[in-house]
Amino acid sequence: MSDHFYRDFEDRHRGSRELIKSRLRAYLPFIEPLRALPGAGRAIDLGCGRGEWLELLGEWGFTAEGVDLDAAMLEACQERGLQTRTADALEALRALPAASLALVSSFHLVEHLPFAELRAIVLQALRVLEAGGLLILETPNPENLVVGATSFYTDPSHLRPLPPELLGFVVEHAGFARRKLVRLQESAALTSTAPVDLFSVLEGTSRDYAIVAQKAAPAALSDFDPAFAADYGVCLEPLARRYDLQAEARTDAMRGALVQAEAESARRFDEASRQIAQLDERLLRAETAIVNVEAANLRADAAMLRAEAATAQAEARAAQLASYLDGVLNSRSWRITQPLRGLGADYRALRAGVRRLNLVASTRRRSRSLVRWLARAAWRSALLRRLALAALDRLPGLRRRLRAVVFDAAGAVVDPAPLARAPHLRSPRSARILDELLRAVEAGKR
């Protein structure tokens, strides 16, 4: 390409110069022992692009030349004073003498080449390298499923992805003594034991890889052994296995949690069943208590009805008694016997006093005097006289007692004069009682 399209494309999709240089420093373990070779110092970078690798080689003390077919890319290198020229990669190697270089490199070039041309470049690199020299071929890593399925084809000049085993077999078949697969640009989180999700399996594998091949040498190359023995990057297979193991661990944990949850659910179910049984028992007791309360209420209602009936009967009886009492209180006999009721009360009190003081004889004399006095007093009043005679007519027992008190031993005869003055008497019996009362009065005067 002769215009600036590919340079602009690289600026957009490959990353900044500083980012690319930081990534390329991953090859330093291979480069440092390379500088110790007798003829080390010369290097060629095929498809040098913007020249980031050429800059690093210059910093590390190499005399490096870059070749490329894109004029815009070479212009970027020339702006930084890097040694570059326009040339085809294969033709540039063919033009070099055998065993003249310590390092042949290409970064993201081989995926642009037909496979036959790739094999020819590998063979020419083996020819121009000195004993112990290195070949570095970096390319997108199709083990990264996102790279192999999508991002690889973002570059329109890419032909096909190259699996690591294929590119490694190419250099081995060409005659290189040993090779190392270096995986690059993986997610830093995947280098730890952190959990791996599915997207990390799809996209987290190293996005680029390189085959670093070394030409055989008669002298020992032990200084390179640590670099060739180390492991680099993240491979898809162990990453997927790690995901499976973690998924199994999560599944086991979920099973354990499920067993615990089932046990807890069973325990809670048993507890809930026990509580339900207790609630049922309480409910039964409550229903029984309600039935008992309702029965008690019915009994109370019945008792209340009986009490109301008894109250009604008592009220009726009370009304009857009140009516009867009103009749008694309003009767003539009640009014006539009022003084006698008072006299009876005094008499009962007097008898009680006599019993307490053993004054029976004295009390009787005083009572007779009192009775005589009352009889005289009653006889002076026409109304009291009529009432007394009417009462005595109804109370024969009281009449006999009064007669014994009022009448003297000789049995005086009532003066008929008072009978003439009391024409209201209804019967001879009443007249006789009045006569006895009058005689008692006269006797009391004497």
Image (tube, helix red, strand yellow):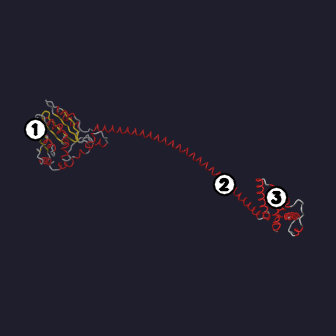
Q: Is residue 408 visible?
A: yes
Q: Kindly identify the amino acid type of the residue bearing the numbered disc 1.
A: Leu
| Position of the C terminus by quadrant | bottom right
Q: Look at discs 2 and 3 and give the one toward the viewer.
A: 3
Q: Kindly identify the amino acid type of the residue bearing the numbered disc 2.
A: Met
Q: Kindly identify the amino acid type of the residue bearing the numbered disc 3.
A: Arg
Depth order, front residue of 367/311: 367
The residue tagged 3 is 365
The residue tagged 2 is 304
Percent x, y for residue 135?
16, 37
Q: CA distance from mark 2 to mark 1?
A: 131 Å
Task: Specify few, some or many for label 1: CA neighbours under 10 Å numbering under 14, 14-19, or 20 or more.
Answer: some
Percent x, y for residue 104?
14, 38
Q: In terms of image quadrants, where is residue 443?
A: bottom right
Q: CA distance from mark 2 to mark 3?
A: 60 Å
Q: Is residue 351 left or right of residue 116?
A: right
Q: Is residue 309 left or right of residue 85?
A: right
Percent x, y for residue 161?
23, 41
Q: Look at discs 2 and 1 and give the one toward the viewer.
A: 2
Depth order, front residue of 345/275: 345
The residue tagged 1 is 96
- Say which residue appears at 26% left-offset and 45% top-offset: 150
Q: In terms of image quadrants, where is residue 203?
A: top left
Depth order, front residue of 238/1: 238
